[in-house]
Image (tube, grey):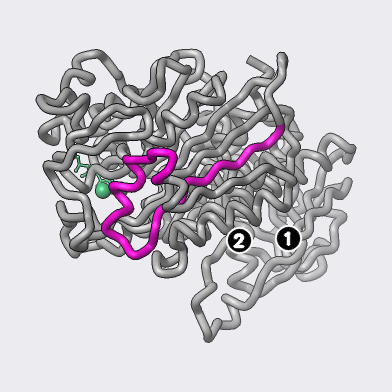
Amino acid sequence: MHIILREGNLFQATAPFAVLGVWQDEPLPTDVAAFIETEDFQGKSGQTALLYPRGTLPARRLLLIGLGERDKTTLDTMRRAAARAIRRAIEMRVEQVAFSLASHTTLAPVEMVQAIVEGAELGHYRYLDHKTDLSPEQRHGVHELVILVRESNATLEQAAATGQVIACGAGRARTLANMPPNLLTPARMGEIAQEIGQQHRMNVRVLGPDELQAQGFGGLLAVGMGSEQSPRFIIMEHGQAGPNTPTVCLVGKGITFDTGGISIKPADSMDNMKMDMGGAAAVLGAMQAVGELKLPLHIVALISAAENMLSGRAFRPGDVITTLSGKTIEVLNTDAEGRIVLADALYYAQRYKPTAIIDLATLTGAMMIALGPHAIGLMGNNQALAQRLIAAGQHTAERVWQLPLWDEYRDMVKSGIADIRNTGGGRAGGAITAAAFLDAFVGGYPWAHLDIAGTAWADEGSREYYSRGATGIGVRLLVQVLRAWHEA
Ligand code: BES
Ligand code: MN
Ligand code: ZN
């Protein structure tokens, strides 16, 4: 989508489709009030009205979008309104949209512009790669978004560009997680990481089965063993470490399909487990954005990619495996595979002596039960890092909620015969015992674990800028944390 910032207001702009955000229970601008009954449109959040000014205004169509109460406005209000507008434009097969920046909020214009661009691009996203017969609506796209501002300047232009880069990163993550598991294999994920790295001159290495064997990635190999698709370990490096350049490791769970293994999952909605690489997708999408934004940090992406299948070679409940760290894991349930592949990745992260490690994983059904689709669960060993993520979550509306990680939970993953076991023994505290397991592999480095099991996938309509499918959750959050790194 081509984004243009233009000075002026809606009552001057000729546009096929103009959009005006309206605050709840506040008088409409007189030019608009002339041709709508205010009793029909109060500006409630999500309310819309499409007007045809017929020459009264230069715009051919005018879409009013309710923004809700003015003092409850957040950046997400703007994202959602922009997404709604774009969807309406697509339905009507209009190619150009003019959006007027709502006035008089406490939000800074730079933030608003970025949010509008994000919302527009996220709302425009569709996954149509496998449709061979597109409907006219599906074929249609909005090519141009004009944002009407009081005063244009380089900072606003940059905010628009930033919004676009971030939304594009989220789109990349959505597509990866939407991709069917026969097409997105661990090997393919490795190739995609190479492609992203090449575009931004990053150093990328992809370790295949032989190298994993040679280096001792016992966790990743065990989980990948049942599949014909061999596992990969992906390392991407942006920038380099320095006295004022912290190293942040982003670790992603990349299970391209999770059958549960020998501890097989029920058939119902098993297809959804193609999104079990949502953490890896977020890391890849964030790396793409980080490269484009040229962030002044040393950022290392580490992804464990494997397919969790059943076969005569698959790992079993009862197995004891030796991980990269040398620590042994007693496997109680092969469906708790994410933590096993992450164990190797988190241990690998220690070689960078990182300032922070952030892992993202669709790790537990328990997290989905605990927080539902509205918050990412966070656990970790460092409160300053947790606070950074919580603050970024408020800013991006990829909200983060912390759960405790007390020693009692660590006790729950002790094993009688190995160093650790891969479940808490029962379902109780399942999201936290998973985190307690991961904690054993981070070597005390500042670390935060984000369980995105509940948030990586959306059912239709859960947010204006989500469509049914992958949400790309984590990309905007990570980019925000990294952009704000030097501010805290
Ligand atoms: N990938 C799943 C978790 C998941 C469930 C993600 C639903 C997204 C939606 C994970 O590998 C898993 O199967 N976890 C088990 C762990 C249990 C066996 C200890 C779970 O949550 O049931
Ligand atoms: Mn599983
Ligand atoms: Zn899984």
The amino acid type of the residue labelled 2 equals His
Relative to 115, 72 lies left or right: left
Q: Position of residue 53 (x, y in %)?
A: 74, 65
Q: What element does badge 1 sit on? A: loop
Pick whichever, 384 or 44, lies toward us.
384
Question: Residue at 38% across / 37% down in the picture?
Answer: 342
Dividing the picture into quarters, in which one does residue 155 lie?
top right
Q: Position of residue 164 (x, y in %)?
A: 70, 49
Residues rendered magenta in the picture: 213-239
In which quadrant of the rendered image does the C terminus lie? top right
Q: Is residue 285 magenta?
A: no
Q: Is residue 373 visible?
A: no
Mark closest to the chain's N terminus, 2 or 1 = 1
User: Mark 2 = which residue?
Assistant: 124
Q: How many marks?
A: 2
Q: Position of residue 208 (x, y in %)?
A: 47, 52
Q: What element does badge 2 sit on? A: helix
User: Mark 1 = which residue?
Assistant: 1
Dividing the picture into quarters, in which one does residue 411 lie?
top left
Pick whichever, 210 or 355, lies toward us.
210
Question: Residue at 57% across / 58% down in the picture?
Answer: 191
Contact check, label 2 and label 1, Cβ < 8 Å: yes
Is 377 placed above or below 152 here?
A: above
Circle 2 Cα neighbour tier, 10 Å, few/some/many (<14 / 14–19 / ≥20): many
Q: Position of residue 206 (x, y in %)?
A: 54, 49
